[in-house]
Structures are given as structure tokens and as C-alpha cells.
Image (cartoon, coloured by chain):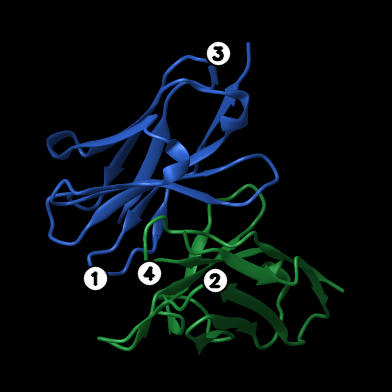
Chain colours: A blue, B green
Amino acid sequence: QITLKESGPTLVKPTQTLTLTCTFSGFSLSTSGVGVGWIRQPPGKALEWLALVYWDDAKRYSPSLRSRGTITKDTSKNQVVLTMTNMDPVDTATYFCAHMPEEQWLVAFDYWGQGALVTVSS
Amino acid sequence: DIVVTQSPDSLAVSLGERATINCKSSQSVLYSSNNKNYLAWYRQKPGQPPKLLIYWASTRESGVPDRFSGSGSGTDFTLTISSLQAEDVAVYYCQQYYGSPYTFGQGTKLEIK
């Protein structure tokens, strides 16, 4: 059974750095083809894909992160970490991490965490 | 970036009736070498994370009821719910994964008439 859970601060101040951790179980990020992504959703708005890390440590980022974001994996701890610098109130959102299945070229997300609401405010 | 646009923004359908949601991409998401459309559909109920319904434009995810079907190719796609159930009240999103950034549509809110 695959599960994912996001953890991190619920409130950050503008210009601060956000660090979110996705802790997962039921799969290994060393399995060929597997990936974990981060997607966010501002209150009442649509989903926005942010970043993705593959089993081989290849990474993809949305241009919207504009070099503010970094995704890393720790296979031994079953964790993926998203770091975003210089946070702004427009970054207020629920942040989801999600599992990408191992089928080649299939960048869809079949298991999701419950999400972590992050508010950016002074 | 590939822009994905859904229509309508909201939809009200009677229980047991058919619901149809459209998704249009700004460029083709059909990869000619494998003849696959790189498009997925999700359902998001209030207060919950999204749930994957359809991938490769028409392949139903395991456990998804067969009243859900996906169709289309190239730039134009459709999600059809053949007989609306009360539990289908949700926001539906399409997502292209042809190229990074992997963009979502703006969502379609489905309600009961």
C-alpha cells in the first residue's frame, strides 16, 4: 500500500525559505521509472505542478519556481524534500506530494498525500 | 509551455444523466512514435487530494468505475461520465505530460442539477 505524507511549517514569513518533506512508504525511489512530484493548489484555485524527481535523480522544475526551488531525494529515508527560497504571499497554497508510477513516459500521479497548507504572511 | 484549457468552467447535470467535460491543449500531445496521447484526468472532491481517473487519454486507472471514459486525440479531449452519481460531485482536472512543465487545466466544477 502506497502512502505519502507532507510535513513542514504551516506559516512562513515573506522572504523566508520553505522546506517541505514528503515521507512515503510502499515503494522505493530506487525502482526504475518511479518518481515523486510536488504540486500545489492556492485556496480555491487550480493545481500547479512544481517539480519532479526520478529514481535516477533526474529532476524537472516548473519555470514558475524561477530557480527558487530545489527538489532532493533521500532514498534510504524514503523522503523527498522541496525547498523554496524567497517566499511570497502568492505562494500561499496547499502543497501536495504525489507518486509517479514506473510505466515509461507516464508522468501522471496515482497516489497523493493529503496536502500541507502553507500560509505566507508577516 | 503547453497551455491546457477546459470547458465549461462549471456544469450541472441531473443524477443518472451524462456529463461531458472538454480539454484542449495548445499543441498536440500525441507522440507519433508510440501513438499515445500524453493526457490524464483527475477528480478532486472537496477537502481531498486529486484522484487519478484516466491516463494515456483513455486508459482507466485500476478501480475507477466504468462510467468514466476518456476520448480524443491530438489537442482535443473529453471526459465522459455516462450516468452521474452523487459521489461524482467534484472538480475535474486534465493534465498534459507531453512536455515539462506538466500543466493542468483550470478545472471544471461538476454539480448536481
Residue shown at 44% from the left, 80% from the top: B60
Q: CA distance from mark 2 to mark 1?
A: 25 Å
Q: CA distance from mark 4 to mark 2?
A: 12 Å
- Of residue A94 and residue A88, the one placed in the foreground of this image is A88
Give the SS element for disc 4: loop
Q: Share a chain, discs 2 and 3?
A: no
Image check: A34 left or right of B57?
left
Give the SS element for disc 1: loop
- Amino acid bearing label 3: Lys
- Amino acid bearing label 2: Ser
Labels 4, 2: front one: 2
Task: Return the residue at label 4.
Answer: B98
Q: Residue B23: image x %, image y %? A: 60, 75
Q: Can you tell which mark lies on residue A13? A: 3
Give the SS element for disc 3: loop
Task: Return the residue at label 2.
Answer: B26
- Of residue B76 and residue B89, the one placed in the foreground of this image is B76
Residue shown at 21% from the left, 39% from the top: A78
Q: Share a chain, discs 2 and 1?
A: no
Labels 1, 3: front one: 3
Q: Share a chain, discs 4 and 1?
A: no
Q: Residue B38, relative to residue B99: is it above or below? A: below
How many C-alpha atoms fall within 10 Å of the one at disc 2: few (<14), some, or many (≥20)? few
Q: CA distance from mark 2 to mark 3?
A: 37 Å
Task: Return the residue at label 1.
Answer: A103
How many C-alpha atoms fall within 10 Å of the one at disc 4: few (<14), some, or many (≥20)? many
Q: Earlier in the sequence, mark 4 or mark 2?
A: 2
Labels 2, 3: front one: 2
Q: Residue A110: image x %, image y %? A: 39, 62
Q: Residue A64: image x %, image y %? A: 47, 41
